Structures are given as C-alpha cells and as structure tokens.
Image (cartoon, rainbow, N blue to C red):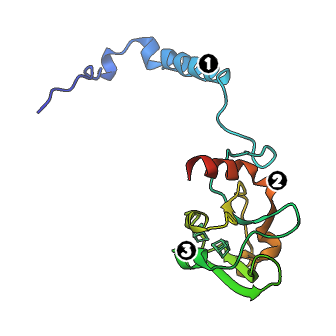
Amino acid sequence: MTKSTRPPKKRMKDLTFLEKAYFVEIIKGLSLTFRTMFKPKYTMEYPEEKYIPSGSYRGRPVLVLEENGKGRCVACGLCSRVCPALAIEVQAAETDAEKERYPEKFEINMIRCIFCGFCEEVCPEEAIVMSKDYELAFTKREDALYGKDKLLVPISQLQDRIEFLRQYK
Ligand code: SF4
Ligand code: SF4
C-alpha cells in the first residue's frame, strides 16, 4: 500500500482563530473569483449570442442547391441505404435534363438522425452535406420530418463545409 502524501488533518482544538473563522479560505476563494473574472470567457449568452461553428462541424444534413436553382441530388439512394438510423427516404423521378433522375421526394426524419455523416461520405455527387445548423427543436413528431423545402440550402451557405470535405474527405 502506498503512503498518503496529504498533510495530516488538524483537530478542531489545534486550529487558530483565523482558521476557525475560515478567514484565509474566504480570502483565497475571493481572490480566485477575482482573477477568473478577467480571464477570457468560454461560455456564451445563448441564444442572444450565436455560436458559429467551423467547417469541420457536423450539424444537420442538408441538400446542396446550386446557383442555377437546381439541386445536385440524382436520387441514387446511396445515402438512404447507408443511413444506420434509417432516417432518409428518397423517391426518384425521371427528368429530361442532363442528369437522368432527381428526388421527387427527399425526406430526413430528424428525430432519427444521429449526425453520423455517413450520407455525406457516401454521396457521389457531393449533394448532401453536414451543415452548421444545430438549432433543432420540435413540439410535434411531424415537425421533425424535413422535406426538400427545409433540406435544400443554397451552396453559398455551405462553402466552409465543402472546402473542408475537399481537403479531408
Ligand atoms: S447523418 Fe447519419 S443518421 Fe443522419 S441522415 Fe445522414 S446517415 Fe442518416
Ligand atoms: S443525396 Fe447523394 S447519395 Fe443521396 S440520393 Fe442524392 S445523390 Fe444519391
């Protein structure tokens, strides 16, 4: 057994008046509080103050909307297959444009999503990416079903993530 390095506890009768009054301890505590007041803060006044994450952050998955107003998704269904939480539903439809198919329906159940990023990793079109959005609160289950109206996000708002993926994916 190793010997304790702590000094032995003093008995009440051996304490000085100042020790009994906790005077020194109070001064020590106050000085620590005072010093800490001038150190940089690591907390924020959320929600008044918003945290803006970097490109490496994995917020809710979104679909990339190109500048010409078209989505990148070609409805291949890979993201839906790989999703471990079975959160993605894709229904494909044909198109006359250069891309053969597009998602007639694309839905993510945000109650199921575990933000793993597998959908993003597997997508061959860089059409689904993890955004910086972390503000998700629902009062009804139906509100957590995100369709294309909520999922399509302009590419200009996703630049940080796309840059990050190009560097590290
Ligand atoms: S982040 Fe993961 S859990 Fe969420 S939709 Fe994508 S693959 Fe599914
Ligand atoms: S988001 Fe990507 S992986 Fe998912 S269906 Fe569209 S193209 Fe395929």
Q: Relative to residue 157, is residue 89 depicted above or below?
A: below
Task: Report the residue that reaches farthest toward the left.
Answer: 1
For the question of whether residue 162 can be seen, the reply is yes
Residue under the point 56% across and 48% down: 168
For the question of whether residue 60 can be seen, the reply is no
Looking at numbered disc 3 in the image, what kind of residue is underneath it? Cys
Looking at numbered disc 2 in the image, what kind of residue is underneath it? Ser
Q: Position of residue 129 (x, y in %)?
A: 67, 61
Mark 2 closeness class: few <14, some 14–19, many ≥20 residues within 10 Å? few
Reading the image, the residue beneath label 2 is: 156
Reading the image, the residue beneath label 1 is: 35
Q: CA distance from mark 1 to mark 3?
A: 49 Å
Reading the image, the residue beneath label 3 is: 83
Disc nearer the start of the sequence (3/2): 3
Residue under the point 33% across and 22% down: 12
Q: CA distance from mark 1 to mark 2?
A: 43 Å
Q: Position of residue 24 (x, y in %)?
A: 49, 14
